Amino acid sequence: MAGSTIDHLVSVTVFLGALLLFISLFNQTLQTAILYQRHRYLAAKCSDLLDNMLLTPGIPTDWGKSNSTPTGFGLQDPEFTQYRLSPFSLMRLWSSIGDPVYYPKTGKTYSNITMGFGNFLLMPSTEAINYATATRLLGINGLYGFQLTIMPIVTISITETKPANPLTFNIDVAGKGFPLANANVIYCFIKVIQKGQGKYPYYAADYGSGYTDARGSLTLSFQGISATDSYALIVHASLSGLMGVGYRERVTSDKRYVLPLIDSMEDRRILLAHSYDVHYYGPPESAVFYNATFVLLTEDFTLREMPMDNSTGKIGKVNYGQGQPYGTLTIPTYNPGILIITYESNNEYGVILMPWGMSSMAFPVVFGDNPFSREWVATDIRQVIVNDIAYQATLALWSYEGYQVIG
Amino acid sequence: MMRTVEILLVVIIITAAFIISSFFAVLPLPRRVSPLNLRRIALTTLQMLDVNYGLSETVFKDLSDPAWGHLQIALSACLPPNIIYNLTVYEVQSEGETKLYRFIKSISNTESLGIASDSASYLAASSNVTFHVIPEKIGERGSGGTLYILNCSDANGWWITGYTAQSLAQDLYNLLSPYFQATIMVQNTTQLGQLLNGTKISSSPYESVTNAVVINTCGEAVPLPSGYYSSVGVGRDASGYYSLYCHTLGRRVSQYNWTWISIVGYPLYYVTNTALFSNEQNNWGIYGMKHVGEAGLNAFLRGINGENYVRDTQWITLGGGGNPSSALVHLSSTAQYFTNYYGVYPNAYQTATRAVPSWIQDRYNLKATTYIFDPVIAGGKEWIAGATFIHQNATGHINGKFIPIGLARTTDIRITALGILSYYKPRLYRSEYTANGTSRLVVLQLGQIGGI
């Protein structure tokens, strides 16, 4: 009788233990499978969402050129099909990487897509499309988070190897995974012509071309440039359909300068602010005299000036502090180009470039939330064209719902 | 003891079940769980390489041409470092219904594309290919089919700043003559007078005065033949106003069922004849022209509608008479479709300063069809900057059409062409695309390396 009871007890205990063990083992397998399925769904959603953003122009189709908030989100250039993006819609995306800039005279905060000193692009928060609006328009608000990165494929780094006699540069052209050997390089050298204190300086442009060597490098030199001259160099490189833009400036006045701020996309109006009004430098400083020119980049990459009347704010003077108004100017066209502003302050000179249309200076775009510390992030890639410049669009997508989700 | 043995047997069975089910329930590799869409990357890469037809040019080059090397460098440079590729080019050969793909060349940065790869294909056309497009002629399947372009050497234009009526006439001829059975330049006002009389002015067997299309290239001015059509009671009223000529013109449009096109500005605002008005000017220094004013358009509309002549000086368009000065107008969806169909691409939005009000439809028995621009509301009224207005008589028959393009100067004749083509819709017959040796298929296959 006792033996039978012990047998019973041992068998039931072993059975229950085995049952629990196998339930947990099967459960783990099922759980992993479900998780894999979710991740696969997320990857498919990522691909679909990226196509949705890149293959529709949004509503209205020309929202990139207006001040209005779109009712449908899309970045395609309405004048083209396939993966061609509007350089103006991209300008209106609130940048996730640059620190926002506050300008007290307008009381607005500006999205900062500046690429180093002298290459400014500042879009007011009232016109920039923020992440929350984009998720709402895409119908993923509260369900998914994303970060959209649109980076130029061709990177052109310009190094000044000799400051004068002759001024020499080393140009390195590379793609995502390889240097661009034998690329056709066309350059435009802009020298600031010094007119004297209190005058409006202008520029002289010099053009040339060359080819990169097997390492993707090219050396350029310019005679007749002294170490105190201010300049800007814009370089355009292309090979078999891949095109990119690079730039570099040298200025003698890097504290007092003119800061271009976009005021209205619809009216193509730009504000020109004294740098002291934005950066709050110390003691009182002198006014800045500027001369602005808008140029289009033609197919052979020569610059073609689009004339602006003086009444549109082509030349002027700005100062900082209360009672000193900012300058305004109107870009004459919606064709992408570059706003070149030469300036003088206290006999120091410089040049500022601002792209009109994201692609004119191959500015990158980073839009959306930060994917860092998300549990599972799916990514997908497309090669896109923005006004003939090659970019790579990457979407990182993560889910806010479901099992094992952090955040 | 027996039960323990039984339980152990059960445990062995469940363990076996678990092992067997685990064997079949193989989880995929993480790369397959969350894959890059390699097919899309391949397609967009090919499209990018062909942005300025660079790829299409390269794949037709000799195999020893350095352009193939450049293509490989570009391909390596634009793909992420962990992506491996194989690009293969085939020539497309057609034999009847069958298509053969002959291998031309392959470029790769790897010997094997690994366990998972995907590909996209792209058809490149040779730049040497000549594509024939044969348009259907307007009038081929019905009446009409004659286009008259007013190219009067004895008339001046207004609001066609930067052009002359003659240069616009030539451009319109080049643009539209393939679509008409007969395109005839009306070389002077005398020939216009003959037309108004219903007389043919050329030897073309296809010329037909009735149901013709007439384009006035003089902008806001309209050529006036001397003689009968400038006489009292026909061209000018008892008070000397030439708005009566516009009324007569309206009657002729209705009588011959013409499609009358005003290419820019306020229609029929002046009459022009350099001989008749050699000492007259339009108040802006253009001689050979006489002011008619707002009464011209009103008289013309009355003429089309079969009403008696009344000199009505009410300004009815935008830009005057208490109406808004201008409005921004957008190409209608129909017009946008036809821009692609006919390859005529004017700017998608324009400034209208002389758009006609929509109420003229009720007032003059007109009906706006095939809008070039979507109507806009401004100043509480609806304005139409471009559409074909058809006039229907009491029996419902169409007798007369009017296309007023109420845009600001300078004139864009592509809008005129688009307006005519979207109304008549001549078909385009395109030639065969895949002729032998003219197409090459480019296949880009991508794989991933690294990771698991």
Image (cartoon, rainbow, N blue to C red):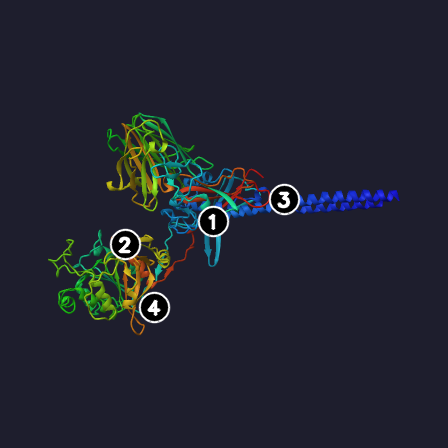
> Looking at this view, is B345 or A25 the one in front?
A25
Q: Which mark is residue A32?
A: 3
- Measured as percent of width and height from the top left, residue B278 is found at 11, 58
Residue name at image x 15 percent, y 69 percent: B233
> Looking at this view, is A344 or B255 the one in front?
A344
**Which chain does the numbered disc 1 sit on?**
A
SS at circle 4? loop
Displayed quadrant of residue A254: top left
Asked if badge 1 and badge 4 are on a common chain, one would say no
Residue, disc 2: B326
Residue, disc 1: A138
Q: Amino acid at mark 1?
A: Leu
SS at circle 1? helix
Distance Cα–Cα, label 2 vs label 3: 65 Å
> Looking at this view, is B430 or A146 the one in front?
A146
Q: Amino acid at mark 4?
A: Arg
Q: Residues within 10 Å of mark 1 (few under 14, many from 20)?
A: some
Q: Amino acid at mark 2?
A: Ser
The answer to whether residue A389 of the structure is visible from this angle is yes
Q: Residues within 10 Å of mark 2 (few under 14, many from 20)?
A: some
